[in-house]
Image: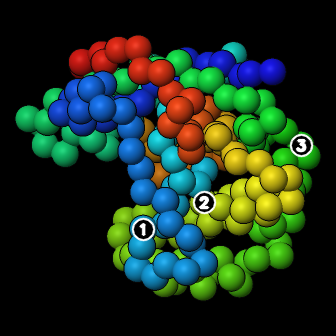
C-alpha cells in the first residue's frame, strides 16, 4: 500500500527553478559523530513540505506561501515561489508521528536520551536553529535509526501536525499545519513551480 499526497514547498524562486530542473538535494550526517554541524530540523533530516489536512484550517499551499514570504524573502527584492509536488511513500516506510503508538515510541526515545540529546545540541553549529533549543529533530533521528535497525527498513518520510510561526508568536500548543519531511527524494514528483 502507498500513501499519496500533494505537497507544497516554499522557497526562493531561483532555488525553485533549479529544483524543477535538477530535483531536490539535502545534507544528512550522523548526529552521533558530527560536531559543529547544523541540527536536524524538527522532523529530522529531509526536504520539508506542507500538506493539506482536513482537521486544520490552514491549507498546505497557503502555509508554504506564508513560510516563503517570511523566511525565504530576506530582502524585498527576493522573489519567492511554491514548488508543488506529488509525494508517494510506501506505507511500511512512512512514519506518522500523530499516530498514538509512534508518539509513545518518540516519548520513550526522548526519556531515554535526554542527556545525549543535550550533548549533541551543545556541540552543534551555533545558529538560529540551535538558539530555538528544540531537540525534536535529534530525538526523531534517534528514533528512525532505532526503527531502521530493528525492522531492516529505510524510512522514506516523516509526517506530523506542527506549528510554524508565521506572525509574531514564536511557539504555540495549537497546530497550524501538517508537514512531511521527505528523506527519500525518489518519493517526490515535482509538478510545477508557482511564482508569488
In the rendered image, the vertical position of residue 45 relative to residue 25, given as above or below: below
Q: Residue at x 73, y 29 (%)?
A: 90
- Other-residue count near label 1 (Cα within 10 Å), few / some / many at <14 / 14–19 / ≥20: many
Q: Left of 45 or right of it: where is 103?
A: right
Evaluate if marks 1 and 2 touch, with contact meaning CB atoms under 8 Å apart.
Answer: no
Q: Which mark is residue 102?
A: none
Towards the viewer: 30 or 171: 30
Q: Residue at x 81, y 21 (%)?
A: 1
Distance from label 3 to label 2 (Cα)? 19 Å
Residue 145, image quadrant: bottom right
Evaluate if marks 3 and 1 touch, with contact meaning CB atoms under 8 Å apart.
Answer: no
Q: Left of 49 or right of it: where is 75?
A: left
Query: Is label 2 in a helix, a strand or a loop?
Result: helix
Can residue 168 be seen here? The reply is: no
- Other-residue count near label 3 (Cα within 10 Å), few / some / many at <14 / 14–19 / ≥20: few
Q: Position of residue 44 (x, y in %)?
A: 58, 55
In the rendered image, the vertical position of residue 45 relative to residue 163, given as above or below: below
Towards the viewer: 141 or 131: 141
Q: Residue at x 54, y 54 (%)?
A: 45
Query: Which residue is tagged 2?
Result: 137
- Other-residue count near label 2 (Cα within 10 Å), few / some / many at <14 / 14–19 / ≥20: some
Q: Position of residue 61 (x, y in %)?
A: 45, 20
Residue at the left extreme?
A: 77
The quadrant of the image that shows the C terminus is: top left
Number of labels in the image equals: 3
Query: Which residue is tagged 3?
Result: 100
Q: Residue at x 61, y 32 (%)?
A: 178
Query: Is label 3 in a helix, a strand or a loop?
Result: helix
State how the image is colored.
rainbow
Distance from label 1 to label 2 (Cα)? 11 Å
Query: Which residue is tagged 1?
Result: 38
Amino acid at each position: 500500500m502507498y500513501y499519496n499526497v500533494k505537497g507544497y514547498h516554499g522557497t526562493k524562486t531561483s532555488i525553485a527553478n533549479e529544483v524543477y530542473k535538477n530535483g531536490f538535494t539535502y545534507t544528512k550526517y550522523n548526529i552521533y559523530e558530527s560536531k559543529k554541524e547544523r541540527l536536524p530540523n524538527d522532523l529530522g533530516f529531509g526536504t520539508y513540505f506542507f500538506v493539506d489536512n482536513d482537521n486544520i484550517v490552514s491549507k498546505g499551499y497557503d502555509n508554504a506561501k506564508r513560510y516563503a514570504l517570511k523566511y525565504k524573502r530576506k530582502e524585498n527584492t527576493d522573489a519567492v515561489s511554491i514548488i508543488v509536488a506529488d509525494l508517494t511513500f510506501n506505507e511500511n516506510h512512512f512514519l506518522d508521528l500523530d499516530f498514538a503508538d509512534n508518539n509513545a515510541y518518540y516519548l520513550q526515545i526522548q526519556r531515554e536520551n535526554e542527556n545525549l540529546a543535550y550533548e549533541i545540541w551543545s556541540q552543534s553549529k551555533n545558529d538560529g536553529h540551535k538558539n530555538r533549543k528544540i531537540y525534536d529533530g535529534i530525538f526523531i533521528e534517534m528514533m528512525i535509526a532505532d526503527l531502521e535497525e530493528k525492522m531492516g527498513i529505510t524510512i522514506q518520510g516523516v509526517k506530523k501536525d506542527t506549528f510554524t510561526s508565521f506572525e509574531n508568536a514564536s511557539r504555540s500548543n495549537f497546530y497550524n499545519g501538517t508537514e512531511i519531511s521527505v528523506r527519500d527524494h525518489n518519493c517526490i514528483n515535482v509538478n510545477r513551480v508557482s511564482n508569488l
